Amino acid sequence: MVFLNGEFTPKDQACISVMDRGFLFGDGVYEVIPVYAGKIFRLSDHLVRLQNSLDSIQISNPYTPEKYQNIFDQLLEQSPNSNQAIYLQITRGADTVRKHSFNELTPTVFIELNPLIPKTKTELENGYHAITQPDFRWERCDIKATSLLANIIYSQQAKQSQVEEVILHRDQMMTEGATSNVFTVKGNTLFTHPTGQHILSGITRDLVIESARYCGLIIKEVATKIDDIFSANEVWISSSTREVMPITNVDSKLINNGKIGQHWSQVYDHYQTIKNA
Ligand code: PLP
């Protein structure tokens, strides 16, 4: 079952109008919210980011936090105590004619669950590969928009290059991954791009910073040169579905001789503690 506009419906019977602006323009926003053992993780942070995304594109939030919680609870009843990723999408809704500007419409709300299988520490310890690419996305990467063509192009490049992620740079400065935030460690210092319009402010990014601080790392939220990635001691990516993942090879060059860093291991452990609290 999925949730669509007030109804719980089998997925293959859930329909939207061809005039829905999500379909015509990608005019909508979304969230991906992890659920561990049936417990929704950091829901209020995700709902705050959702509100920011909606405000940025002038869509009125159709539901209260309590209503979202209630819908999620009903969907989660189908698979109690499991790990899931909630996918929540809100589009501006359906108009009568296709035009770029908009009138106030009734938003379309779609929510579904997908199984979430976090990688084990042993799996993560193998390390992952990434490639770098110029960041040709727009200047409002802080909006979690469903119009994701650039990210799709990068993700397909990653797939074809058989790597986990594409790490992006704008004017030679590293921004984030196509579907993640990026961190580098040098000595005892963790570097990551500051929040703002050039990155998505990841909920996991905040947790990684919190964990790193707990583990004694100095945090510097500054943009760093993309070339500096090759001399980093550690490179990590983070997202709600991947948590914090070590990258040991960038553009076919080894990071830290291809070895997993000790800071990643500590931060990973602390992240698990927060998750399971
Ligand atoms: N940056 C981009 C471009 C993303 O698509 C994502 C997640 O999908 C993230 C960062 C990480 O965000 P979060 O940790 O909230 O999942």
Image (cartoon, rainbow, N blue to C red):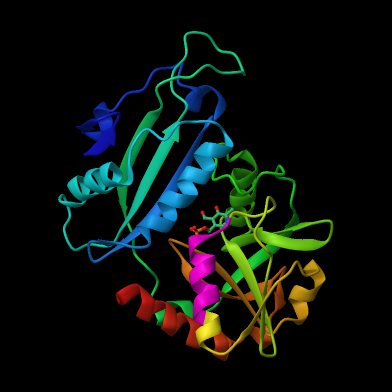
Question: In this view of the protein, can residue 37 be seen by the observer?
Answer: yes
Magenta residues span 201-211
Up the image or down, 104 lies above or below 71; here it is above
Up the image or down, 266 lies above or below 140; here it is below
Q: Position of residue 104 (x, y in %)?
A: 48, 19
- Is 207 inside the magenta-drawn segment? yes
Please tell me which residue lies in front, 268 or 12.
268
Please tell me which residue lies in front, 132 or 234.
234
- Taking the spot 83% from the left edge, 61% from the top edge, the residue there is 172
Up the image or down, 182 lies above or below 73; here it is below
Q: Main secondary structure of the magenta part?
A: helix
Please tell me which residue lies in front, 116 or 58.
58
- Taking the spot 31% from the left edge, 43% from the top edge, the residue there is 112
Residue at far right of view: 171
- Taking the spot 18% from the left edge, 46% from the top edge, the residue there is 74
- Is 250 inside the magenta-drawn segment? no
Q: Quadrant of residue 106?
A: top left
Image position of 249 (left or right of 88): right
Q: Position of residue 213 (x, y in %)?
A: 55, 83
